[in-house]
Image (spheres, rainbow, N blue to C red):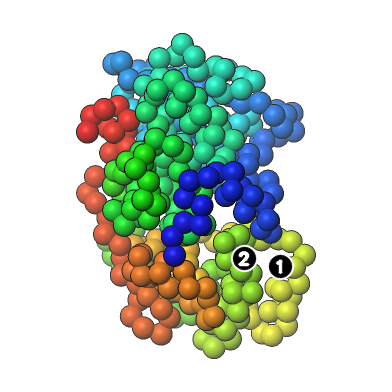
């Protein structure tokens, strides 16, 4: 199954708006009410050379997985970053950075000599503004892949370079469009996980944990619940509730699961601190667990047809068989490769 909307952002937004829990993902929330819910901040750091790289960061969540903050140490020229007001990133602090509150991203960029633009996509507020501006000004734009791709991924901006995890992901997200170029850089998330993992074997616990994904709007909630209940009851696995799924329906489902004897794990426990086998429906957490040396599987009885295609593309293995093999991780850090591409070094 290909992308449901390979070109039209408006049609994709209509689809997203029709799904549950779609509200509130346009913009990151401010860090404090005093900073206000609107506006943006322009962060600048002067460097050497003619390159002036512009990053648009709408949210800290996907930005880290996509490697946006990790790119900054490798940018030798000047760096310019646009964020929503109130979004605090440690990488944008320090004496080298200057900060300016602005009303609109595009209006503040004219005259800065920007030579390239990088975002997580144009489906978020800052990303849309920057890609629209870059296209009008003739500045090369790029989008970095930050998660596994499903048929419900947003379309890429016109005339953009996709910085993909793999060639397969690149072709999938490109969706046959001639205006999209693909560069394979690998996954910053998986690269970091591989380099954080100890050379010694992790102390393993036998009892697996099932990672809930009930906030995923592309997955029917009944599929996620059925998968979790089926696996936990048949194996005695713990259930780690999706921290982003907190509505009344989810709370009621969790209460029912507990009454049926399913034990919950603390959802605050990071994947990096898991010493258990990991199971989920389709999450990138399965790949990260495999990279970290943990047995990892996927499980989705009565799942939609695209799930099996998704598993095959990423090499995810079904529960009951051999664990998911660790994805290949390159020797070069993706963030460094991305910086080189943005500054014209490769």
Q: Is residue 289 above or below residue 253?
A: above
Please tell me which residue is depicted at 31% across the width and 44% down the height of the picture.
182
Q: Nearer the viewer, residue 214 or 10?
A: 10
- What mark, if any, has residue 115 been given in the picture? none
Q: Is residue 190 above or below residue 159?
A: below
Q: Measured from the top left, where is residue 242 in percent x and y?
A: 61, 63
- Look at mark 1 in the image and give the residue it sits on: 250
Residue 176 seen anywhere in this rendered image of the structure: yes
Q: Nearer the viewer, residue 311 or 249?
A: 311
Taking the image as shown, residue 225 lies to the left or right of residue 149, namely right
Q: Nearer the viewer, residue 302 or 343?
A: 302
Taking the image as shown, residue 323 lies to the left or right of residue 330, namely right
The span from disc 1 to disc 2 (Cα, nearest Å) is 8 Å
Q: Residues within 10 Å of mark 2 (few under 14, many from 20)?
A: many
Q: Secondary structure at mark 2?
A: loop
Query: Furthest-top residue in view?
Result: 111
- What mark, if any, has residue 214 been given in the picture? 2
Placement of the C terminus among the 4 image quadrants = top left
Q: Measured from the top left, where is residue 307 in percent x and y?
A: 47, 70
Q: Is residue 325 above or below residue 257?
A: above
Taking the image as shown, residue 274 lies to the left or right of residue 75, namely right
Tell which circle, 1 or 2, labels the residue nearer the N-terminal end. 2
Q: Secondary structure at mark 1?
A: helix
Q: Measured from the top left, where is residue 128 in percent x and y?
A: 54, 34
Q: How many marks?
A: 2
Q: Nearer the viewer, residue 313 or 59?
A: 313
| Label 1 close to label 2 by CB (< 8 Å) | yes
Residue 266 seen anywhere in this rendered image of the structure: no
Q: Residues within 10 Å of mark 1 (few under 14, many from 20)?
A: some
């Amino acid at each position: 199954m290909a992308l449901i909307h390979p070109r039209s952002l408006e049609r994709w937004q209509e689809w997203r708006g029709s799904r549950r829990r779609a509200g509130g993902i346009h913009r990151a929330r401010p860090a404090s009410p005093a900073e206000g819910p609107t506006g943006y901040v322009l962060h600048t750091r002067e460097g050497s050379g003619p390159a002036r790289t512009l990053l648009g960061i709408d949210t800290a969540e996907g930005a880290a997985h996509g490697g946006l903050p990790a790119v900054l140490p490798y940018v030798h020229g000047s760096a310019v970053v646009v964020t929503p007001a109130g979004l605090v990133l440690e990488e944008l602090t320090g004496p080298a950075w200057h900060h300016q509150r602005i009303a609109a991203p595009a209006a503040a960029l004219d005259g800065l000599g920007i030579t390239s633009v990088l975002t997580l996509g144009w489906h978020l507020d800052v990303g849309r503004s920057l890609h629209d501006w870059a296209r009008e000004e003739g500045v090369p734009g790029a989008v970095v892949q930050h998660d596994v791709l499903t048929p419900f991924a947003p379309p890429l901006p016109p005339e953009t370079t996709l910085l993909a995890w793999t060639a397969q992901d690149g072709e999938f997200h490109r969706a046959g469009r001639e205006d999209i170029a693909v560069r394979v850089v690998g996954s910053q998330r998986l690269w970091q996980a591989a380099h954080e993992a100890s050379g010694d074997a992790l102390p393993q616990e036998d009892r697996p944990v099932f990672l809930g994904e009930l906030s995923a709007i592309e997955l029917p909630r009944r599929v996620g619940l059925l998968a979790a209940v089926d696996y936990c009851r048949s194996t005695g696995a713990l259930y780690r509730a999706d921290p982003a799924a907190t509505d009344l329906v989810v709370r009621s489902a969790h209460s029912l699961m507990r009454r049926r004897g399913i034990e919950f794990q603390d959802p605050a426990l990071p994947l990096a601190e898991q010493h258990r086998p990991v199971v989920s429906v389709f999450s990138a957490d399965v790949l990260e667990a495999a990279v970290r040396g943990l047995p990892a599987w996927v499980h989705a009885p009565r799942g939609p047809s695209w799930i099996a295609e998704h598993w095959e593309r990423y090499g995810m293995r079904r529960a009951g068989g051999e664990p998911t093999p660790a994805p290949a991780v390159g020797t070069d850090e993706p963030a460094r490769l991305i910086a080189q591409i943005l500054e014209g070094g490769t």
